[in-house]
Each structure stands twice: as structure tokens, then as C-alpha cells.
Amino acid sequence: MRRRILELIHAGEMSSGAVAEVIRSEFAISQPAVSQHLKVLRDNGFATVRTEGTRRLYSLDAAPLREVDRWLDTFRRNWTPHLDALATEISRGKRHRASASPRSDKENIS
């Protein structure tokens, strides 16, 4: 649910009411519950909020996500060769299945 909120506010500023409307419809939770999730995101640095009149406008603070991405980069270096090898094996399997497929009826008759 918090990831979905981050997706929503990634596109630009969004009022807490608009966020709550989307999240309530998708996850069937109350407006106070949505507000609590927004607070957690704000308190942990993933979202910023500014007040405009009576509205609270939320937007994404991408800095913590960039930090997570840098941390994950360490693991990507290990994953990439394995994923490349997996892609190669999948391709080999497809080629093998294609070459081992049964002959057509015309070929079996002759």
C-alpha cells in the first residue's frame, strides 16, 4: 500500500484527500488509515508535505530511494551474470524444443 502511495505522489504533488480517495478505493481502508500511512512515509523521509490553504500536498522525496538503489547495486553485480546465464539456458531450451518438435503429418506419410 505504501508503495502504491509512492507511485501516486511520484507523478507530482497530490493532496492527502486525493491520495486517500485512490487508496481507499483500491485497498478498502479508511481515510484515517491512509493518513497514518502518509505520516509514516513523511516521518521516514520518503514523502514531503506542504500546506496550501487547508490542503496538505504530498510529493515524493526520491533521495531515500536513490540510497536504496545504490545499496541494491551491490547485489545487482552478483545477480546480473546469473540472470544472463538463465536467459541463455531459456533460449537453448526453446531452440531444443523447436528442433525436437514432431514432424508434420505430410512428413510422416512419406
Image (cartoon, rainbow, N blue to C red):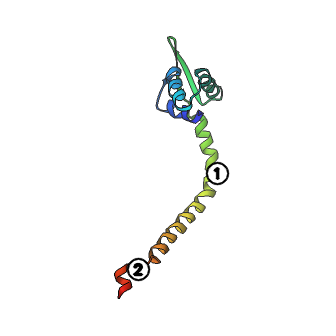
According to the picture, the residue beneath numbered tag 2 turns out to be: 103
* Up-down relation of residue 58 to residue 104 (above or below): above
Q: Position of residue 8 (x, y in %)?
A: 50, 31
Closer-to-camera residue (68/99): 99
Label number found at residue 74: 1
Q: Residue at x 49, y 68 (%)?
A: 91
Quarter holding the N terminus is top right
Residue flagged by tag 2: what amino acid is it?
Answer: Arg
Which of the 4 image quarters holds residue 40?
Answer: top right
> Which residue reaches farthest top?
53
Q: Secondary structure at mark 2?
A: loop
Find the distance from the CA under tag 1 to the CA under tag 2: 48 Å
CA neighbours of label 1 inside 10 A, class few (<14), some (14 to 19), many (20+):
few
Residue flagged by tag 1: what amino acid is it?
Answer: Thr
* Up-down relation of residue 81 to residue 69 (above or below): below
Q: Position of residue 63 (x, y in %)?
A: 58, 34
Q: Position of residue 76 (x, y in %)?
A: 60, 53
Nearest to viewer (mark 1 / mark 2): 2
Q: Which of the two discs, 1 and 2, labels the residue nearer the N terminus?
A: 1
CA neighbours of label 2 inside 10 A, class few (<14), some (14 to 19), many (20+):
few
Marks 1 & 2, CB-CB < 8 Å contact: no
